[in-house]
Image (cartoon, grey):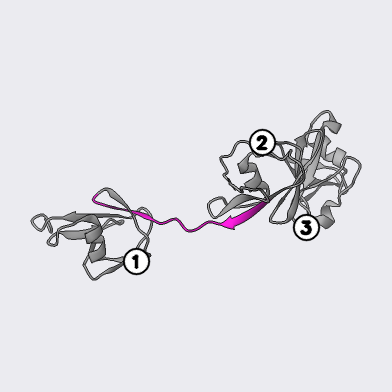
């Protein structure tokens, strides 16, 4: 983002540290070097930090201390400024990344690849026994021989859990009839079945089809209390 102040053009960039904390900083140059970015981040010594950015083809690439980047042409506004003395290279879905800290967390891998952990899972690739990388993994090692490879896989939709008279039931079908819900909950045939919802709860007849959603709550009432 560019701003004019008293005739001087300033470029606003986002600086991200190793904890993924973000801060906006202003630069007086539209073609800053890596060293300029570290100075803007107020990090010292300058040669103790790497500057990384996302190029047009994705991933993370180093902006070396003496190299310039055209902020207006590339549209790059976000820079990681990370301490380290060497870069570790890895790939996610065939895209190249560089990072100066190993081991790193699973959550950081999902972050740099812009992956939603609720929808996709990261797996190691090329090992004798590949494993899923959880966002909760505290230590993913990048320091082994060669380039570490990861691949994302779409997660299977989670089977919803419904509650019938406060008892949890995992349901594998997208729809259930009232009769099926009654049978699942062991509800007697003369009891009335209801689905909790805002406002008035919904009576469910045996032949009514219900779209199942996670967290739905059903309950039954004996005929003596129905309508009271």
Label 3–label 2 contact, CB within 8 A: no
**Eye-nearest disc, 3 or 1:** 1
Residue 171, visible in the rendered structure: yes
Q: Which of the numbered marks, if any, corresponds to residue 175?
A: 1
Residue at image mark 2: 19
Query: Which tag, 3 or 2, sits closer to the chain's start?
Result: 2
Which residue: 57% across, 43% down? 135
> Is residue 163 shown in magenta?
yes
- Quadrant the C terminus occupies: bottom left
Q: Which of the numbered marks, if any, corresponds to residue 56?
A: 3
Viewer-proximal residue, 19 or 59? 59
Magenta part of the chain: 150-165
Position in image of residue 1 (x %, y %) = 76, 51
From mark 3 to mark 2, how far is it between C-alphas?
24 Å
Query: Which tag, 2 or 1, sits closer to the chain's start?
Result: 2
Q: Secondary structure at mark 1?
A: strand
Q: How many numbered marks appear?
A: 3
Q: Secondary structure at mark 2?
A: loop
**Residue occupying the far front of the picture:** 128
From mark 3 to mark 1, how far is it between C-alphas?
44 Å
Position in image of residue 121 (x %, y %) = 57, 52
**Eye-nearest disc, 2 or 1:** 1
Determine whether 116 is above or below 15 in the image.
below
Residue 201, visible in the rendered structure: no
Q: Which of the numbered marks, if any, corresponds to residue 65?
A: none
**Residue occupying the far bottom of the picture:** 207
**Residue occupying the far right of the picture:** 66
Which residue: 68% across, 56% down? 93
């Amino acid at each position: 983002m560019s701003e004019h102040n008293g005739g001087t053009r300033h470029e606003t960039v986002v600086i991200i540290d190793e904890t993924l904390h973000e801060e906006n900083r202003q630069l007086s140059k539209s073609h800053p070097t890596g060293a300029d970015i570290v100075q803007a981040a107020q990090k010292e010594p300058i040669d103790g930090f790497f500057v990384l950015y996302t190029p047009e083809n994705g991933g993370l690439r180093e902006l070396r201390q003496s190299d310039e980047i055209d902020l207006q042409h590339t549209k790059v506004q976000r820079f990681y400024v990370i301490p380290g003395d060497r870069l570790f290279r890895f790939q996610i879905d065939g895209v190249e990344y560089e990072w100066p800290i190993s081991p790193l967390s699973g959550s950081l891998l999902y972050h740099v690849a812009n992956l939603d952990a609720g929808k996709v899972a990261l797996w190691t690739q090329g090992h004798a026994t590949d494993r899923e990388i959880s966002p909760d993994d505290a230590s993913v090692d990048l320091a082994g021989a060669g380039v570490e490879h990861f691949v994302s896989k779409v997660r299977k939709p989670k089977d919803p859990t419904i509650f019938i008279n406060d008892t949890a039931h995992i349901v594998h079908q997208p729809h259930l009839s009232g009769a099926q819900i009654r049978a699942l909950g062991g509800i007697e045939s003369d009891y009335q079945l209801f689905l909790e919802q805002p406002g008035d709860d919904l009576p469910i007849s045996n032949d009514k089809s219900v779209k199942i959603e996670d967290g739905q709550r059903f309950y039954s009432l004996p005929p003596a209390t129905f309508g009271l």
